[in-house]
Amino acid sequence: MQKPLILTAAAAFTLATPAIAETPVLTVLTYDSFTSEWGPGPAVEAAFEETCGCDLQFVGAGDGAALLARLQLEGPSTEADIVLGLDTNLTAAARETGLFAPHGVSADLTLPIAWEDDEFMPFDWGYFAFVANKGAKAPNSLRALADSDTKIVIQDPRSSTPGLGLLMWVQAAYGNDAGALWADLADNILTVTPGWTEAYGLFLEGEADAVLSYTTSPAYHLIAEEDDSKVAWPFDEGHYMQVEVAGKVAGTDQPDLANAFMAFITSEAFQSIIPTTNWMYPAVTPADGLPAGFETLITPAKALLLSPEDALASRPAALDAWRTALSQ
Amino acid sequence: MAHSTFAINPRWPGGIVAGLVLALTLGTLCAVAIRAEFQTGFGAADWAAVRFTVSQAFVSALFSCLLAIPVARALARRQFRGRSALITLLGAPFLLPVIVAVLGLVMVFGRNGLLNDAFGLVGLPEISIYGFHGVVLAHVFFNMPLVTRLVLQGWLSVPSERFRLAASLNAPVGRLIEWPMLRTVLPSAFLVVFLICLTSFAVALTLGGGPKATTVELAIYQSLRFDFDLGRAALLALVQFVICASAAIVAWKVTSPDGSGAGLDRAVQRWDGGAKRDVLVIFLAATFLALPLGMIILRGATEVLSLPTDIWKAALRSAIVAVFSSALSTVMALALALRAGRLAAVSGGLPLAASSLVIGTGLFLLVYPFVNPAKLALPITMLVNAVLALPFVLRAMAPAVAKIETDFGRLAISLGMSQQTWIWGVVLPRLKGPIGFGAGLAAALSMGDLGVIALFAGDGQETLPLAMYRLMGAYKMDAAAGAALLLLTISLGVFWVCDRGGRTVADF
C-alpha cells in the first residue's frame, strides 16, 4: 500500500467511482478499535468471508458516539450496510434517525438481562468498573469511594462513552440523589479526561489509584501480558452495563448479505473472537466457555441498565448535575 | 503590515491562497451551518466555557512569551557546544501529539512524577499538576519553545552594525535595539500562542481537573459527536472565530513596524555582558524541556524496535503526507508573505481560529455527495495539514519578507529589476533561514497531527498518530510508547533537516 500511495492519491482524484469488483461488498461501519489490527476486525472479516462469497469491508469512525454522528452526517445515502458498535446509551437516538431495519434474528443470548429489541442485536457486553492495582485499599461501593480519599481518573461524559456510562451508573444507582453522590465524589476525582485512552494511560503511569474502565480490563493484563496485578473493584450498588449492538441499515443494497451478517454476529465463529480481541464478554458464550483467565474476573451481584429511552431522556439533567457538582 | 505595497511583489498568488484558506475555514463552517437546524441557544455553561477558554489562553500566552524572552536573548548572545542541538530541540514539544506530551509532563510533574519524588525525599509537600496552573504549565511547555524560536529569529535579524554602533557609543542596547525588535515580534507570537491555547481542548481537560476546565472546543466536540447538534457546533465555532478576531485586532494595534534601516547582512556579534545569567537561563530552559522529553524517550526506547510492521507503514505514510503538506504550506506562506496587507494577515491567522473538527465535518459534508471520503483521506489530510500549519510558516517568513522589501525594495525598483529576478535573486536567498524553519515546522506539525484523518481514514490509511491512538485504545500502552518515540524521532528528524538546511546560511 505504501509505495503506490501517490498513485492512489492521484487515482482518487480522477476516479470517483469505486473499483468494479466481481464479488459483492458488504460495508460495516464500526468504531476504530474494532477494525484496528489489534481488534476483532481482521479475524471477523476472515471468518465471514469464508462463507459469504463476499468482500467484507470495515469503515472505522472514532468511538461509538462518533459512529452515530458519522451515520447522521451521511444520512439515508450512507454506503454502510451494517452499523456495529453502538451501545444502549445511543440506540434511542439511533432509532430516531429511522435509518435502521429490524434484524430478524433470534438467538440464545447469554446476557445477564433480558433482551427485547427488534432493531439492535447485541454482539458483546461488559460491566463498567473501577480498575486498580491489587492490594490498593478497595472501597466496596460508589458511596464508600466517595467517602474515601482514593484518587480516581474518570472520562468526560460529554466526549466519551465510558464517561457517559459512569454518569448513567450513578443515575441508575442513586436516581434523585445522584447530584449529592457526585458532590461527595468530586474530591476523589484527580481529573476528567476526554477519552478512555488518556484516563487509562494516566492510571498505568501511576497517577491515580483507580480508573473507570471495565470488569474485563484485568483480563487483558492477565492474558496478553501475564500480569495479574490489576483488579476491578466489585461495588454493592451493582454495576452499570455496556451492551454493544449492531443494526442493519434499512437502505442497504445488499439485504441478503446484511441479513447473513446479522445472523453471523451471534454465531460461534464471531463470538469466540470477541473475548481476547475486544476484551468484553461475548453476547453468546461459546460452547468451549470463556478463555482461561476470564474466570478470575469479578461477577457483579447486580446488573444495572437504563432502557435506551430512559438513558436518552435522563441525560441532560444528569449532565447538569454532574457539571454543577464537579465545578464547585 | 499594510505599509508594504511595493509593486515589485506579485500579489495574485497570495490572493489564491487566501481564497483557499477562507474556503477551508469559513466555507466549511458554512457547510456545517447549512445542514443545521438551529434550536439551542447559548447557555450559562457555554459562557463559563468561553471565560475559561479565554483566561487560560491569555495566561498561557503571557507566560510563554515572558519566559521565552530571556531564553531567546541568552541563545542569541551565547555560542556554545550543543547550541544548535538545543535550538532544534526547541521544536520538539510543539510537535508532539498532545497525549504523548501530557504523559511526558505527568511523568515529571505528576503525583508519581520525578519532581514529587524529589520533593518527597527532602520532605516537601506533594504538588499537584491538575488545575488551572497545570493547563498553563502544559501550554508553556508546548509554546514557550516556539516563541523562543520566533523571538530568536527576531534577535538574529537585527543587523550587527547596530550592535557595533551601540557598543562603540556605550548606548543602552535594551532600550534602543532590543525593545523595538520585541515590539515587532512579540505581539504576533503572543497572538499565535493565544490562539493555539484557545483551540486546544485535550490538554485543558486532561490537566484541568474537571468540567471547570471546559473549553469552547470541547463544547464543539460534544455537539458534533454526542449530540449531533450541528447548529450549536457552528454557533460555537463562530464564537471561537470572534474571540480570535478580537485578539488579532488587539495584536495588530500594538505591533509596531521595524523601521530602523538595513545592515550589511552580517551575523550578530555582541559586546554586552550577562554571561552567568545567560548560562543559568539556558540551563533551566533546557532542563524544563528535556526532562519530559527524556521520559518519553526512556519509556519508548525498549519498544521501538519491536513495533509491528503496520506501524512502520503508517510512519512512512505519515512522512509522505508531511513532505507534501510542508511543501504546499511553504509555497502558500510565501505567496501570502509577498502579498502582505490585511487579506494576507487575516488568512494567515484564520486557520488557528478554526476548529479542526468543524473543518473535518464541513469537508465531509462537502465531499460526501460526490465521492466516498475514505478515497480522499490522504490528499485531504495533506491539504488540511498544510493550511493548519500556514499561520506558523507565515509567522516565520512574513517579518523577513517585509524586511527584505523595506531594505532592498526601493533599490530593486530603481534598478528596474524584474519580479522573477527579485524573487529568485534577492528574496529567496535571504529567506533560506525562515523557509527552512517554516518548512520543518509544517512537516513536523503534519507528522504529529491527528487532525481530520480520524474522520476520514478507511482501511490501510492510518497515519502514525492515529495508529498510536489505536494501539493505546487496544490497551497496548507500551507499544504506543514505542510508536510515540518513533513519531518524535521522525518529526524532529524532518524538522532538523529542513531547519539545518536553512540555517547554514542565516546562522552559523
Image: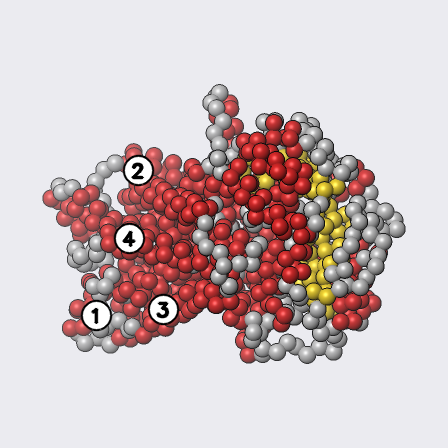
Q: Secondary structure at mark 4?
A: helix
Residue B19 visible, this orientation:
yes
Quarter of image, res A39: bottom right
Give the Cα distance between marks 4 and 2: 29 Å
Compared to residue B460, the image places residue B279 above or below, namely above
The tag on residue B6 is 1
Location of the N terminus of chain B (image quadrant):
bottom left
Mark 2 sits on what residue?
A: B278
Q: Chain of mark 1?
A: B
Q: Amino acid at mark 2?
A: Asp
Mark 4 is surrounded, within 10 Å at the Cα level, by few (under 14), some (14 to 19) or many (20 or more) other residues, namely some
Nearer mark to the viewer, of 4 and 1: 4
Give the Cα distance between marks 2 and 3: 41 Å
Q: Secondary structure at mark 3?
A: helix
Nearer mark to the viewer, of 2 and 1: 1
Mark 2 is surrounded, within 10 Å at the Cα level, by few (under 14), some (14 to 19) or many (20 or more) other residues, namely many
Give the Cα distance between marks 2 and 1: 40 Å
Q: Position of residue A300 (x, y in %)?
A: 76, 37
Marks 4, 2 in one chain: yes
Marks 4, 3 in one chain: yes
Q: Residue at x 85, y 51 (%)?
A: A286
Compared to residue B19, the image places residue B279 above or below, namely above
B237 displayed left or right of B507: right
Q: Earlier in the sequence, mark 1 or mark 3?
A: 1
Nearer mark to the viewer, of 2 and 3: 3
Q: Chain of mark 4?
A: B
Marks 2, 1 in one chain: yes
Marks 4, 1 in one chain: yes
Mark 4 sits on what residue?
A: B251
Q: Secondary structure at mark 2?
A: helix
Give the Cα distance between marks 4 and 1: 24 Å
